[in-house]
Amino acid sequence: MKKTTLVLLATALMTACIDDHTPDDSTPADYGGRALVLCEGAWGNNDASLTMVSTQSGDADNQWFEEGNGRGLGDVAQDMLLYGTKAYVTVTFSNSLEAIDTATGQSIRHDMGNMHPRSIAVHDGRLFISCYGGHTVVVCDTTDLDHHVATLQLGDYQPEGLAVADGRLFVASSWIQRANQAFDYDSSLYVFDLSTLTLDTIITVGLNPQTVVTLDDNHVAVNHNGDYGSIPSGCAIVNTTTLTVSQIERSTTGITATDGTLYAFYRQGYGSSMTTSYWCYNAGTFTQLPIDADHPYSISVDTVGNIYITTDGNYVASGDVLCYTPDGALLWRTEAGILPKKVIVLR
C-alpha cells in the first residue's frame, strides 16, 4: 500500500540518550520477558500477523495469534498499543479492531464497518482511532468497543498518526488521492480538547505528516514525509501548551519516543545504494546511534532504553527484529512476519 510501504526509512556520546533510561530499583524484576511484534503484511494478501518474542533470547513464535484464535489477523495491520492487560490492534482493510488478551493470545474482533482504521491512542479509558472512512477519529470506550462515544471530523485529507498530551489529542492530516490519481498532501495537525471532544485549532507542522508520538508531558513529535521527491522529510516538535512548532533539522523516516528522548532513523536510496542513519534527540542534543541494521522499517524503544529495529524483507519476504542495548550493542536478531512495524514489551 502506497502510504504504508512508503514509510521508508555510529559514536560516542550516548549520554543524552542513555541516562534517562538507566534501570533503577523501580524496574520490575520480570520486566522485558516478552515482546509483541505487529507485522503489517502485504496489501491484499491477508497475511498480517503478530509475533511473540522472548526479549531475553530472541526466540520467536510467529503463530502466536493464529494459535490463540484459529484464524489470521487480516489485511494490513496498522497500529498496536498496550492498555492494561490487552493489546489493541487496528487492521485497516479488514476494517477491524482486535482486543487481545496478552496472557492467552485470545482476541475479540470488533467490526468497524467501512472505516478503515489506522492509528490508535488511548486516554482515560478511551481509544482514539484515526480512520480513512470519512476522514475521522472514532472514540471508543474500552469497556464497550462496539459503542462509538464520538466521531471527530477532520478535513479533506486522510488522518494518520495521533497522540495524546497535555489534555489534548493531536491528529496528523496527511494525504489524499485525487480523481486524476495524483496524490495531494496536507501539512496540518488537528488539535482536539479531550475534555469536550471538540476541535481547538489546526496548526502547520510540515508536508505529509504521518507519525505522531508523545515526547513528554508538554511536547509531541511529528514525522512529516514530504512529497517523496523535491520536498524532504523532517520532524517537528510541538509545544502542547503554547502550540508553537519547531523543526528538527534532520531528515527522518521513522520515529518513536520515551521519557523525553526522541529516537529516529533515516533511510535513503534502494538496494545496494541504500544508506541509513540512526540518532536520538534529547533537550536539543543529537547523538548518533551506533546501529548498523540494513533496510529498517520501524524503530521502537522500551522504558529501559533497549532499541528495536525491524527490517522490511525487501517488501516480499519476512522481516527481522533486531534488539540493541541503549549503547548500540546487538543483543539478538530474529525473524518475524511480513513487514514488522511495531514492537511493544509486555510486563
Image: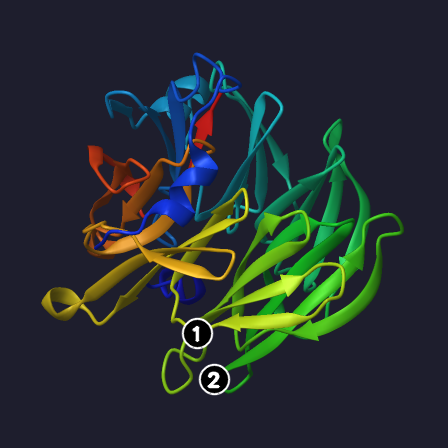
The spot of residue 130 in percent (x, y) is 64, 54
Which mark, residue 62? Answer: none
Residue 176 sits above or below residue 90 on the image: below
Identify the residue position indicated by label 1 in the image: 249
Q: Nearer the viewer, residue 343 or 64?
A: 343
> Does 239 sit left or right of 304 as displayed?
right
Residue 22 sits above or below residue 78 on the image: above
The spot of residue 88 in percent (x, y) is 57, 34
The spot of residue 302 in percent (x, y) is 44, 35
Q: For numbered disc 2, what is the local secondary structure?
A: loop
Identify the residue position indicated by label 2 in the image: 182
Q: Nearer the viewer, residue 74 or 253?
A: 253
The spot of residue 186 in percent (x, y) is 59, 77
* Residue at the outermost left position: 272
> Does 129 sit left or right of 326 as displayed?
right
Instruction: Give the mark, 1 or 2, whose residue is nearer the N terminus.
Output: 2
Residue drawn 78% across the image and 49% down it: 167
Q: Quadrant of the N terminus?
A: bottom left
